[in-house]
Structure formats: structure tokens, C-alpha cells
Image: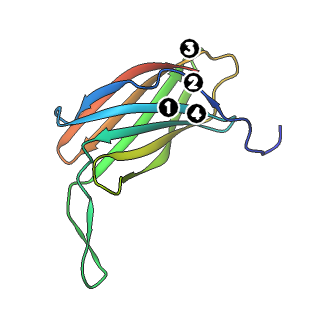
Amino acid sequence: MGMGKGKRKSGGGAGRTFAVLGGHHELEVRRLTWTSEQIELFYRITPALPERWADEPDGSMTEAGPPIFLSLEAEDDLGGEYTDGGGAFGTDPEGRFTEGSVSLQPGPTPGAGSLALALSLTCGEQQSTHRFDMPL
């Protein structure tokens, strides 16, 4: 198979929500998509996570909030393992929520029907891990 993008598929199981970071925030799993190269989980956290950096008048940035880390691991129903491939997130313009995605590599094992996922979120001293299954 070539290095083309591959057909992007989307699984069910979206709309799951978890109380995170001491119950102060809610994380909603929006959707799971995949290609032959990677799996991507899209999420939304409400209310928005605290801003990590603040812009100063001189153009520099200062730390405004605690560091935030989100990581994802998974194993499929055939025993295939997937590792965190990084992600990105940002706050919506009105500051109501944080939205982002995190990827897993490689793409799904042919014939796999579901993923057992472990999503960990750390914000300063608070950490929570959430385990859930999603169909492929």
C-alpha cells in the first residue's frame, strides 16, 4: 500500500463523558477516526482548562497556569497495542471549553473490532485516568 492518506473511518461510541480533575471539569469524547497510519480521538473539556501561558505587553509570555498533560494508550480486542502519538488542544474563542485531539499509532490492526482505551489527564497536582471501550 502506498503512503496515501488512506480512507478515514469513524467509529461509534462518541458522546461519552467523564468527570475529570477532581470533578471540576467534564471531558466528552467527541469521536474516534482512523486511517491505516493512526487513530485519532477528539474531545472537549468543559469548562475550559486554565490557560498555561499569558501574553505580556512586551510580547513575551509568562506562566499563568499549571502544566497540562493528556496521554492516551489503547489495546484492541486482538491484543494489538497502540501508543500515544501526541496531540493538540486549544480554548474556544469565548473561553467556554477546551477542545483537542490525541493520536495513537499505528492504525488499527486489520480485523480488530474494538479498542480498550486509557486516557490520562494531568493538570498541576490533579491527575485522573479514565478507561473505556470504543468500537472500530
Inter-mark Cα distance, 2 to 3: 15 Å
Using the numbered discs, state the Cα–Cα distance from disc 3 to disc 1 in whole angstroms: 19 Å
According to the picture, the residue beneath numbered tag 1 turns out to be: 31
Q: Nearer the viewer, mark 4 or mark 3?
A: 4
Earlier-in-chain disc, 1 versus 2: 2
Q: Horizontally, is 120 left or right of 115 in the view?
A: left
Element at label 3? loop
Q: Is residue 54 above or below residue 1?
A: below
| Between 121 and 79, the one nearer to me in the picture | 121
Callout 2: SS:
loop
Name the residue beneath numbered marker 3. Answer: 77
Choose top left, top right, bottom left or bottom right for residue 108: top right
Q: Residue 39, percent across and down?
A: 57, 35
Q: Residue at the front extreme?
A: 94
Whichever of callouts 4 and 3 sits on the residue coming sooner in the sequence is: 4
Q: Which residue is mark 2?
A: 11
